[in-house]
């Protein structure tokens, strides 16, 4: 509106409806602020949401749909879409057969068989998947000559070998556990890796067969910032302490015969032996009686039970409880009390039961 006397433009205050100058931003009557911006109706808000929010979202989705394939095409053109595998050394552990794989109530008094296990983390940081072969080969100097070692992946929960290839997706990491299968020199027919002090892990990607090379000095292929790895070959493979004891105390006898239960330690033409530390003489007695019975049923032949009890600190270290229990024992039983190492022989000479150990025959006279 226009003021007739002066020709000034006027307007009404939206709050008090007073007539005020058109350019006023504060009403001189009610002192309320005056905004010239038009109020948005619900229809205006809906139209804004439709035109300015929904439309750009659709545009972004369309751009993404076009960009991702284009990016993948560029990576494929440059062969940059390969999986990127890396192996991080975590540490060394051991599986004790008869202990780690046995319920607490059924665990024995001794662990004879142990298997060194190397723990790694295998990671695929590339954009595509890889199918990994669950075995690895290493090549390193042991002693004075290079040795090649073959390793397989194992499941520590079941202590069984993992034989199936597995898929490692893009961005995925898994823990793997390696145990030695066998090792030897190149002259013995063992295949080395391409370079000394390295390990090789095989996998397949979209381009075919590939090899991951692990530098034993770095612990991770292409990464020197990780803690130094170890030489898995130096750890060795499965060790059975009973094998050494058998070779030490009865080298000229049959050893490790399987009868369906525990293997027989030593077997001669007349006797069947069980080897245990002297403080486990009762375990040895139970085992040798069971095995002589199994041998008689399987072969219809008789063998006299005999014990080789080791780790004696003196010539006569028989526990009194053993002597009392076996004094009138039948059937006939022979017990040899032997030192852990023979003090009368060099390291390359064998122990002779009749010369280095003390013999006790039961029933005692």
Image: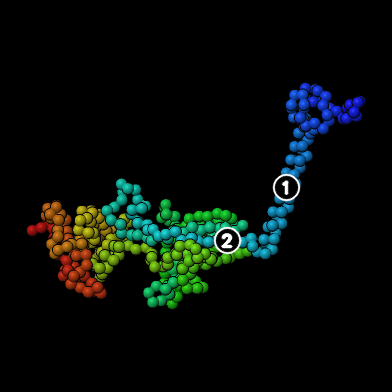
Name the residue located 50 percent from the left edge and 73 percent from the top edge.
Answer: 195
Q: Is residue 346 left or right of residue 7?
A: left
Q: In the image shown, does 207 or 267 lie closer to the viewer?
A: 207
Dot 1, how many residues are within 10 Å of its Cα: few (below 14), some (14-19), or many (20+)?
few
Q: Mark 2 falls on what kind of element?
A: loop
Say which label, 1 or 2, has the lower sequence index.
1
Quarter where residue 279 is shown = bottom left
Q: Secondary structure at mark 1?
A: helix
Q: Which residue is mark 2?
A: 84
Which of discs 1 and 2 lies nearer the camera? The answer is 1
Q: x, y (%) of residue 87?
A: 50, 61
Judge whether residue 135 can be spotted in this image. no
Q: Which residue is mark 1?
A: 60
Task: Indicate how the structure is coloured in the image.
Answer: rainbow
- As displayed, is residue 188 above or below residue 66? below
Task: Tell me residue 322's x, y (percent).
Answer: 15, 54
Residue sitting at x 46%, y 71%:
197
Q: Quadrant of the N terminus?
A: top right
**Nearest the camera: 182 or 125?**
125
């Amino acid at each position: 509106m226009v003021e007739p006397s002066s020709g000034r433009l006027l307007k009404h205050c939206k709050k008090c409806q007073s007539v005020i100058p058109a350019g006023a931003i504060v009403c001189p009557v009610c002192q309320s602020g005056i905004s010239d911006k038009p109020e948005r109706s619900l229809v205006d808000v809906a139209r804004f949401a439709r035109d300015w929010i929904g439309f750009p979202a659709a545009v972004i989705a369309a751009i993404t749909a076009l960009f991702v394939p284009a990016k993948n095409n560029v990576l494929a053109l440059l062969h940059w879409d390969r999986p990127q595998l890396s192996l991080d050394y975590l540490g060394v552990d051991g599986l004790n057969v008869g202990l780690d794989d046995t319920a607490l109530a059924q665990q024995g008094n001794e662990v004879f068989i142990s298997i060194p296990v190397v723990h790694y983390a295998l990671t695929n940081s590339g954009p595509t998947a890889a199918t990994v072969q669950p075995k690895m080969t290493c090549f390193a100097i042991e002693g004075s000559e290079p040795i090649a070692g073959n390793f397989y992946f194992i499941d520590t929960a079941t202590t069984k070998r993992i034989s199936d290839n597995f898929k490692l997706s893009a961005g995925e990491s898994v823990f793997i556990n390696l145990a030695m299968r066998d090792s030897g020199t190149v002259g013995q027919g063992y295949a080395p890796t391409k370079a000394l002090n390295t390990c090789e892990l095989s996998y397949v990607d979209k381009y075919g067969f590939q090899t991951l090379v692990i530098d034993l000095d770095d612990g991770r292929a292409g990464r020197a910032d990780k803690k130094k790895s170890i030489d898995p070959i130096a750890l060795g493979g499965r060790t059975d302490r009973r094998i050494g004891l058998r070779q030490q105390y009865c080298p000229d006898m049959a050893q490790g015969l399987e009868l369906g239960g525990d293997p027989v330690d030593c077997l001669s033409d007349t006797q069947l032996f069980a080897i245990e530390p002297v403080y486990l003489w009762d375990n040895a007695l139970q085992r040798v009686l069971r095995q002589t019975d199994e041998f008689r049923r399987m072969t219809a032949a008789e063998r006299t039970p005999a014990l080789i009890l080791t780790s004696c600190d003196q010539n006569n270290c028989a526990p009194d409880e053993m002597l009392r229990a076996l004094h009138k024992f039948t059937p006939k039983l022979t017990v040899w009390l032997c030192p852990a190492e023979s003090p009368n022989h060099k390291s390359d000479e064998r122990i002779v039961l009749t010369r280095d150990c003390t013999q006790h025959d039961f029933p005692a006279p």
